[in-house]
Image (cartoon, rainbow, N blue to C red):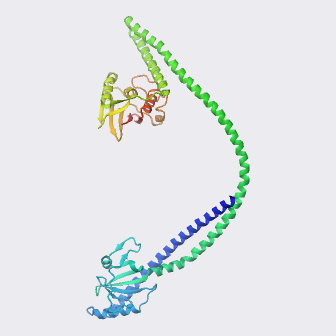
Amino acid sequence: MKNRFQFILSFSVFVILFLGFFLYFVWVENIVYNNLTKQALDDNLTIGESVFDMFEKADVPVENKEEFLQLVQETCDVLKLPNEGYICLVDSVGNLLAAPGLKADKKVNIASASFRSLNRDESFSFTDFYESKPFTGYYEYEQYDYSDIVVAMNYDMMGYKMLVHQSAKMIRGHAREKSLPLLWGGIVLTVFLSVLSYFVTHYQVKKYQFRISAQHAQLAKVNNEIKEKNQTLRGKNMILQDLASEKDALLGIMAHDLRNPIGGIESVINLVSLAGELNSEQKEYFSLLKSQVNSAQDLIADVLEMNKLENDKAELKKERIDLVHFLDQKIKDFAPLANKKEIEIVADYNVSENDIETGTNELNRIVDNLLSNSIKYSPIGAQVTVGLKSEKNNLIMSFIDKGKGIKEKEMPMLFKKFTKLSSRPTNEESSCGLGLYIVKLLSQKIGAKVKVESVYEKGSTFSVIVPL
């Protein structure tokens, strides 16, 4: 197994290095080829200009077409260019007028050939090629697997175009010859590094075998210690779960048992208020006492509801609800509370479909908490907006106030138990820090999501996203 691993690793190193050197060789070959091609095109351009100068010095009359073509043909026959290069002459329809070995009675047309740019990403028709001044690129005959680099220049005196060729295949061969030593050097280096990797791996495997045997014993010892600690943690976790259950049960019992005495205190306050006329100081004390009793009753109600929700395993009972009608009724229900602070509740609905199937009791409690919070934390004379809109497959209820808002650093604590933030109710209303935690539990139960956006000193928006 060990020898097989070393062989596979060494072979992998060989393959990776060989591929790397081969790709590098191809890359270098392309660079050399491109440089040789550029040099060949520069040479062709120089050759073409020299041939034009020679034609002009020959002083052939422009009107003497036959004498001119004979001169060009003689030049084509004797002129030898690098890389099997040659020159030829064509007219505007592709007829070959002069080329090495071309007979006067032989008709050759190159209009069916293709012409491509140097990077081969653009193809030209013969007409496009003929109108280029000058053209530098590839001249190709696909049916003969034939390709040259070519510079084509206009000979304005006679209206023809001269093509100066060099074989692309020959240039590619020269590029490969220049780059081949690099490939052989890479192969030798690849073999050397592969053999070296085999022996280095062999040494490292031996070295790590000694370490592994020592570490194995240490790991076995640590594993036993971890098992013992896990058993201890399981025991402590069970104790904590029992304590949490006892705490929840005790909290529920205390809240339930406190309802009667607090209710008794409320009854006494009401009886005293009816017993006779109270002076202003007595009225202030009884008003404060009644406010504290109401706060205690709200806290007890929230604790009992939280305890019920945390331990509720009952299946959700869904009903069909018209949300527009539902929210309108809620606005009416909370109008007296809002009027005490001269707050206007405004409805802003934009929905195409307003019916949903969800838990009525749960949704009712969610809206009660969020709408009462919006009123509670809004300044006197402000405006609270109750919004409803459709978005994809959801209906979104929003409750927007212009209160103090929530500090950014306090946002993560928003939906935790008994959380009281720096922003306080604006008219000394009670707040026990359970309302938003209950909203979170109820939203999870009906499959909704609660989202909060708030800017400190400007207000908050609480949104409930209910799936259709």
- Residue 139 seen in render: no
Who's the residue at 43% across and 85% down the image? 85
- Residue 64 seen in render: yes
In this rendering, is residue 257 above or below 453? Answer: above
Q: Nearer the viewer, residue 374 or 67?
A: 67
The spot of residue 74 in percent (x, y) is 37, 93
Q: Which residue, as the protein is rendered here, is positioned at the far left?
A: 63
Q: How many marks?
A: 0
The spot of residue 374 in percent (x, y) is 37, 29
In this rendering, is residue 199 above or below 170? Answer: above
Q: Nearer the viewer, residue 193 or 335?
A: 193
Quarter the C terminus occupies: top left
Who's the residue at 32% across and 76% down the image? 125
Instruction: Answer with left or right where residue 187 lies relative to residue 114.
Output: right
Q: For residue 237, which quarter of the picture?
A: top right
Who's the residue at 69% across and 61% down the image? 3
The spot of residue 390 in percent (x, y) is 33, 38
Q: Nearer the viewer, residue 366 or 447?
A: 447
The spot of residue 27 in percent (x, y) is 51, 71
